[in-house]
Image: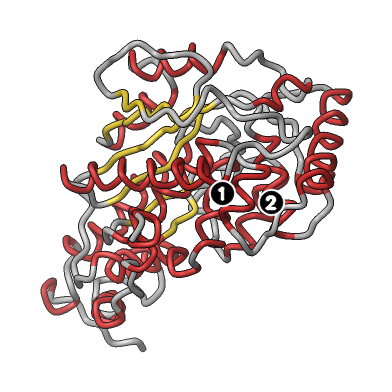
């Protein structure tokens, strides 16, 4: 059995008994019922994922996956493709936003090269699983072969499995790849059936002419490739990216390992749509870290049935929104284990 098939087969439903136990405990903690809102919901979800009534978040990682895109040559980005390897080096030196935010929440950053167009020198924290030197342009044909799509997903699975063996309670997804909001928009449009203009935003900040080119590129990619929204591999191969496939693999691998996965922004949501198309069983393991200002992100989250933890007007990627949300997820689990019950504190739980 392939790594992908075995992983999908290994994903179990959340543990209902553990979720019921946390829900019952929330009702006896020293607070009005429901007063901690989303924190209570997250604690229940985490209990179901970890299959225990006192979930914990001690071991945390952000897996930031990089890949280049042939469609970047179609004038869809404000930045040149050379920025992808430059930013990867910045991640490895600890100087990017994701490094700052990961340090704040105590998460390790794992940088994965699945498809950067040049070779990155070996460095601590870098995992090289290169599928190719960037994808083909989706306006002219498929981004990759179906075999490459499988390989990118399986690479993500293997990376998160390795992190799980090292100790992992929650993982955040992240991305780096100039031009990657264009294939992400194509995936969202294909899955939701919405027009390209409704799900395609400005990405790195293109002007009106650049936005028009992006929308046209998404429309052309969908017309040329006709991806099947019900076939995750077809969707990824025809209009995706290597890092999008890797993110889908991280989600599937985390779910199979009983690890919560905090999905970052627009590109990560595209990976989540691919993962969900492969098996809806992985969706309960997802937590939407934030809502990006990229206009397609809200539509992707709605399709997945996910509500963002925060909405800070961000659109950077890298895993930054996921890092912030991981701190909130940890807060939710600590409430369950550290907050006193009415009986512990000698506080009346009677409602007058």
Q: Residue at x 25, y 61 (%)?
A: 335
Specify few, some or many for label 1: CA neighbours under 10 Å numbering under 14, 14-19, or 20 or more: many
| Left or right of residue 118, residue 135 in this image | right
Front residue of this view, candidates 282 and 140 = 140
Q: Quadrant of the N terminus?
A: bottom left
Percent x, y of residue 329: 34, 53
Q: Are marks 1 and 2 in contact (CB under 8 Å)?
A: yes
Examine the rendered structure and indicate whether residue 277 appears above or below residue 67: below
Residue shown at 38%/41% (left/top)?
Answer: 155
Q: How many marks?
A: 2
Which residue appears at 64% of the width and 51% of the height?
A: 235
Crowdedness near tag 2: few (<14), some (14–19) or many (≥20) residues, C-alpha within 10 Å: many
Against 85, is 180 above or below? below
In this rendering, position of residue 59 left or right of residue 153: left
User: Does 327 sit left or right of 84 as displayed?
Assistant: left
Residue that mark 1 sits on: 269
The C terminus lies in quadrant: bottom left
Q: How is the image coloured?
A: secondary structure
Location of residue 76 by image quarter: top right
- Write down the quadrant of residue 286 in the picture: bottom left
SS for tag 1? Answer: helix
Label annotation for residue 108: none
Query: Disc 2 on helix, strand or loop?
Result: helix
| Residue occupying the point 36% across, 46% down | 326
Q: In this picture, is 282 found above or below 147?
A: below
**Which sits in the foreground, 46 or 67?**
67
Query: Where does the image place residue 9, in percent across and percent down from the top left?
Result: 35, 68
Of marks 1 and 2, which one's residue comes earlier in the chain? 2
Between 44 and 233, the residue placed more toward the observer is: 233
Disc 1 versus disc 2: distance between alpha carbons?
A: 9 Å
Q: Could you say which disc has been placed on residue 188 in the image?
A: 2
Give x and y (percent) for residue 149.
52, 44
């Amino acid at each position: 059995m392939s790594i992908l098939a075995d992983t999908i087969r290994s994903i179990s439903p959340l543990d209902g008994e553990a979720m019921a136990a946390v829900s019952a405990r929330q009702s006896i903690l020293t607070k009005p019922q429901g007063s901690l809102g989303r924190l209570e919901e997250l604690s229940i979800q985490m209990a179901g994922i970890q299959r225990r009534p006192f979930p914990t978040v001690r071991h945390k990682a952000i897996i930031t996956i990089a890949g280049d895109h042939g469609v970047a040559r179609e004038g869809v980005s404000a930045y040149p493709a050379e920025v992808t390897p430059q930013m990867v080096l910045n991640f490895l030196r600890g100087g990017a936003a994701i490094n700052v935010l990961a340090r704040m929440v105590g998460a390790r950053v794992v940088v994965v090269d699945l498809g950067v167009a040049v070779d990155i020198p070996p460095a601590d924290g870098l995992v090289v699983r290169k599928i190719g030197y960037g994808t083909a342009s989706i306006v002219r044909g498929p981004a990759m072969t179906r075999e490459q799509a499988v390989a990118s997903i399986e690479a993500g699975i293997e990376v998160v499995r390795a992190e799980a063996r090292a100790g992992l309670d929650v993982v955040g997804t992240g991305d780096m790849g100039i031009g990657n909001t264009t294939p992400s928009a194509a995936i969202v449009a294909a899955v939701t059936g919405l027009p390209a203009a409704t799900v395609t935003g400005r990405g790195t900040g293109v002007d009106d002419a650049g936005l028009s080119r992006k929308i046209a590129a998404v429309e052309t990619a969908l017309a040329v490739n006709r991806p099947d929204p019900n076939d995750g591999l077809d969707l990824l191969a025809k209009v995706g990216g290597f890092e999008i496939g890797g993110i889908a693999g991280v989600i599937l691998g985390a779910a199979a390992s009983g690890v919560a996965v905090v999905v970052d922004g627009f590109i990560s949501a595209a990976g989540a749509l691919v993962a969900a198309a492969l098996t809806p069983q992985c969706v309960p393991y997802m937590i939407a870290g934030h809502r990006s200002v990229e206009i397609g992100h809200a539509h992707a989250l709605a399709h997945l049935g996910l509500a963002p933890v925060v909405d800070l007007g961000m659109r950077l990627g890298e895993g930054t929104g996921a890092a912030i949300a991981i701190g909130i997820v940890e807060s939710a689990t600590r409430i369950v284990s550290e907050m006193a019950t009415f009986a512990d504190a000698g506080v009346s739980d009677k409602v007058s």
